[in-house]
Image (cartoon, coloured by chain):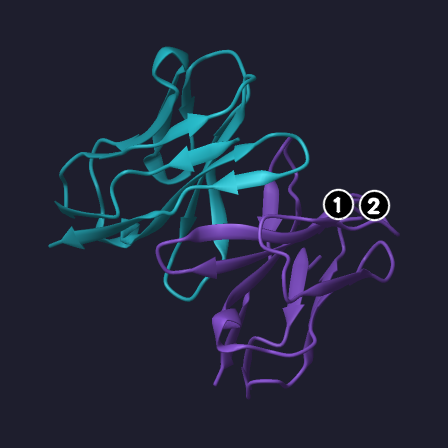
Chain colours: A purple, B cyan
Amino acid sequence: NAGVTQTPKFQVLKTGQSMTLQCAQDMNHNSMYWYRQDPGMGLRLIYYSASEGTTDKGEVPNGYNVSRLNKREFSLRLESAAPSQTSVYFCASPGHGRGEQYFGPGTRLTVT
Amino acid sequence: AQSVTQPDIHITVSEGASLELRCNYSYGATPYLFWYVQSPGQGLQLLLKYFSGDTLVQGIKGFEAEFKRSQSSFNLRKPSVHWSDAAEYFCAVNTGNQFYFGTGTSLTVIP
């Protein structure tokens, strides 16, 4: 039981390149979330998916797209990466207790 | 709009000293409140949570937090800090569909 897994762990992109961050959960939860973490900003919600087939914008969605491929997987895509998207990205799913969130290990992305 | 404020960006304490990390929230209804800890290069780990009932909640690693509705606060405390507690601490509010996180407090522990 791995919980929430993310790939890759590290990535370096050049400005304008595209990439997809992958997230999978094995807890059979309906909801999944994507956050970015920046120094002094805490975690900010990019997109979330309340159930398979639905996605909604969070606080900072610009420059990102998401796909809820199935109940297990929720991917985050950067179509044209910008230096401002240099960040650590976390995927999350509800935890075992009410209202909790369980976080993946994170993806550290650098855009040069 | 919902918000979470952690007024202390960085705190330094000596090992064995007591600790209090402050958190204030802005939310219309009774919130679900959480404290998470993040060690360097790691993901976030849940320390404790409050939903209702007893306003003093106990968590892992000897931490506790007190919910004070009148002050809209949920401060985290530990009576005696260990060097391994050095990390970043985040307060969070769950409003149903979304989580709102504070900006974090970085804790340094001096031997």
For label 1, the crowd category at 10 Å Cα-Cα, with few meaning under 14, some 14 to 19 and many 20 or more, is: many
Residue A82 location, x and y as percent?
54, 77
Q: Where is residue B89 in the image (x, y as percent from the top left)?
A: 36, 46
Q: In this view, does B58 lie above or below B61?
A: above
Front residue of B81/B70: it is B70
Report in which chain the residue with disc 2 lies. Answer: A
Mark 1 residue element:
loop
Mark 2 secondary-structure assignment: loop
Where is mark 1, residue-wise? Answer: A31
Residue A33 falls left or right of residue A52: left
Q: What residue type is labelled 2?
A: Ser
Quarter of image, res B39: bottom left
Which residue corresponds to the image point at 60% horizontal and 37% vertical from the top-left?
A: A100
Amino acid at dot 1: Ser
User: Can residue B64 be seen by looking at this rendering?
Assistant: yes
**In the image, residue A11 above or below residue B51:** below
Mark 2 or mark 1: name the one nearer the start of the chain: 1
Q: How far apart are marks 2 and 1 (CA)?
A: 5 Å
Mark 2 and mark 1 residues within 8 Å of each other at the beta carbon: yes
* B3 on left or right of B70: right
Classify residue B60 by image quadrant.
top left
Near mark 2 (Cα within 10 A), the count class, few <14, some 14-19 or many ≥20, is some
The residue positioned farthest toward the bottom in the image shown: A14
> Measured along the vertical axis of the image, is residue B74 above or below residue B36?
above
Q: In which quarter of the image is residue A70?
A: bottom right
Q: What percent of the width, then of the height, locates residue B58?
A: 41, 26
- Residue picked out by circle 2: A51
Q: Residue at the spot x=34%, y=34% of the render?
A: B63
Write the residue at 65% across / 79% down: A80
